[in-house]
Amino acid sequence: QVQLVESGGGLVQPGGSLRLSCAASGIAFRVYAMGWYRQGPGKQRELVATITSGGSTNYADSAKGRFTISRDNAKNTVSLQMNSLKPEDTAVYYCNARNVFSNYDSWGQGTQVTVSS
């Protein structure tokens, strides 16, 4: 059974930084592409960043230059370093694991990020 547990959310002022982490269990981590998605108030869930098992990354335009996704295949974790945060980054951030063979998605419970002065 796949379990994804996010941590690291919170309240930060505009221009600040946060680091989100996601610990995965119950999966063969190396065969999963990992990602972060977010859902802001009144909005649909959207892609933030993804990373393949080999380390190739993809970012939403809104995240390019400010966010960095990384993974540790030895520890079964994926992280999202978020810098220069803006109020529009306020959202619930979800960790995603996609099986590269079946394309089946698994999701974490989400962690709240609030950017406000």
Image: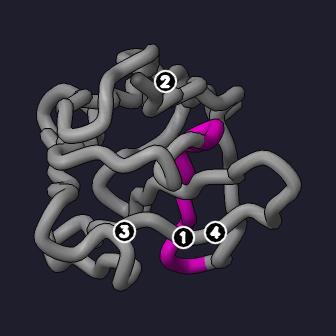
Tags 3 and 1 in contact by the CB under 8 Å rule? yes
Q: Which mark is residue 50?
A: 3
Mark 3 and mark 1: Cα distance apart in space: 8 Å
Mark 2 and mark 1: Cα distance apart in space: 16 Å
Q: Look at the image and give the residue range highlighted in magenta.
A: 91-101
Instruction: Check disc 4: other Cα within 10 Å, few if <14, some if 14-19, many if 20+.
Output: some
Q: Is residue 87 left or right of residue 39?
A: left
**Is 6 or 38 nearer to us in this picture?**
38
Answer with the quarter of the image where residue 108 lies.
top right
Residue at the image position 64 percent from the left and 69 percent from the top = 46
- Rendered location of residue 109, percent (x, y): 70, 27
Labels 4, 3: front one: 4
Q: Which mark is residue 6?
A: 2
The kind of residue tagged 4 is: Glu
Pointer 4: what residue?
46
Pointer 1: what residue?
47
Tags 4 and 1 in contact by the CB under 8 Å rule? yes
Labels 3, 1: front one: 1
Residue at the image position 21 percent from the left and 57 percent from the top = 67
- Rendered location of residue 58, percent (x, y): 29, 80
Residue at the image position 65 percent from the left and 77 percent from the top = 103
Which is more N-terminal, label 2 or label 4? 2
Answer with the quarter of the image where residue 11 lies.
top left
Mark 4 and mark 2: Cα distance apart in space: 17 Å
